[in-house]
Amino acid sequence: MSEEDLTDAIKTIRTVLTARMLATPVGTLQRETVADREARGACWVSRVVLPAPGEPDALDLIIGAVKGLGNGNEQYTIPSIENVRAQWTGHRVGVTKHEPEPDISESEKFLHLKEETKSPITILYMHGGNNYLLGPAARRATTSKLAQLTGGKCLSIQYRLAPQSPFPAALLDCLIAYLTLLYPSSDFPNASVPARHIVFAGDSGGAGLALSLVQLILYARKQQGIETPVLEFHGQKVVLPMPAGLAFQSPSVDPQLTTLPSWAANFEYDTVPPDPPGYDAEFPTDEVWPSKPPRGHYYCETSMLYHPLVCAMAADEWRGCPPIYMAIGSKERIVDAAKYFAQHVVIQGVPVLWEEFELMPHNWPMAFPSHRLSEKCYRSWANACSSFADGFNIQTRGSFTALKIFQERELEVTGLTKISKDEVRRLMRHRESSIRPFTGRQVAKYHL
């Protein structure tokens, strides 16, 4: 694909997405993008339900962290503790790309998946979708590719979506999923997975959720004064360790999206619509959105937008975080936020593998899976996951891959951006002050 063809394809995708997302109620978009489908081709899929714990400890930890990391003005809805749906994904050998999903039980599918797994690595995958769209099936091509390249398996979480289930419901679901991998109940098909073999992975908003989960563990460490905090889970005292690493593609570290300059500056180069949909008086309403009572953001109350458990870019403390892999397109609208975050955590001693790809748009490996920069991204993403789970000593490294000549040059991760912490804080305050609850009867747009 030439640079001109890529530019035309990006524009076409953006035009189609914009028209669809601005004209379709949120509930309809959710039903279309969350729907499960048959798993055809070279992947095993086993659908599971992770039982809700009877104890409140997981939820209490989140409630305590909201208070402990906040300023006292946070408003949010306390979620119920519920079962969590998820899907195991693994590589299926010896079949064609059109091979139908076998007509056997989910437990039998999982047994086949395990038999064809070559590595102990387990990737806990949190899908993108800005916390209100998509599901495991929408990222099945990605998780099956990562499973194939690592030789391991993926557990993709069907976390609860906003706006019906706002913060912290999704975070609670991800915490329960992680604890279930570590300490499975008797009816869970997989044996316990040591934390050293677990990697948190995700794209876009899913990466933000994974970082929220890490921020939660860091808070628990600090509160309890020990490296592995303790809580009750399914009738036993358990510890909450860090995973082996974090591996992200097009990570969204700011749910507000529009805070930093690249959101406006890179509009014409990215597939992302011009504004987050659903905040304009002309946007079609339904039973899902506006929320009841109205709020200014799908995912959370305005008072929570820049809380460390919601916005990774707003979190000050990352010491003790495991190594992070970040793949980003050089012209993504969220690239400034990703650069600021990577630079901020590296300064605190967190190893970061930063890979920047010239002219690539948001989620380009999903949009253009056969592009050579997509193939390179998948290989690097999987290699990072394997390196983390194998316990390699990770050193910070940055690179930029050129589109035309397909050559890589080094980048200094501590010099990715000149945007200062003070400037980020100023822009956050400005954005927060401009947001009004969306009622469907007034213009409450984001101002670029």
Image (cartoon, grey):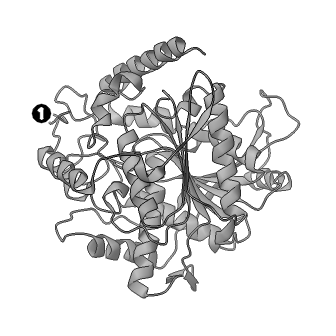
The quadrant of the rendering that contains the N terminus is top right
Residue at 53% from the left image edge and 59% from the top image edge: 84
Residue 81, can we see it? Answer: no
Asked whether 356 or 112 is in front, the reply is 356
Asked whether 38 or 252 is in front, the reply is 252
Residue at 74% from the left image edge and 69% from the top image edge: 191
Residue 100, can we see it? Answer: yes
Q: Where is residue 196 drawn, in percent x and y?
A: 67, 69
17 shown above or below 207:
above
Judged from this view, the residue extending furthest toward the right is 94
Q: Where is residue 43 drawn, in percent x and y?
A: 75, 40
128 shown above or below 317:
above
Q: Where is residue 280 drawn, in percent x and y?
A: 19, 31
The quadrant of the rendering that contains the C terminus is top left
| Residue count near mark 1 (Cα–Cα under 10 Å), binned few <14, some 14–19, many ≥20 | few
User: On the picture, is 294 further left or further right than 206?
Assistant: left
User: On the picture, is 407 further left or further right than 126?
Assistant: right
| Residue with the mark numbered 1 | 441
SS under mark 1 = loop
User: On the picture, is 61 further left or further right than 426?
Assistant: right
Asked whether 94 or 259 is in front, the reply is 259
User: On the picture, is 335 further left or further right than 192?
Assistant: left
* Three-letter code, disc 1: Arg
Q: Give the quarter of the image for residue 60.
A: bottom left
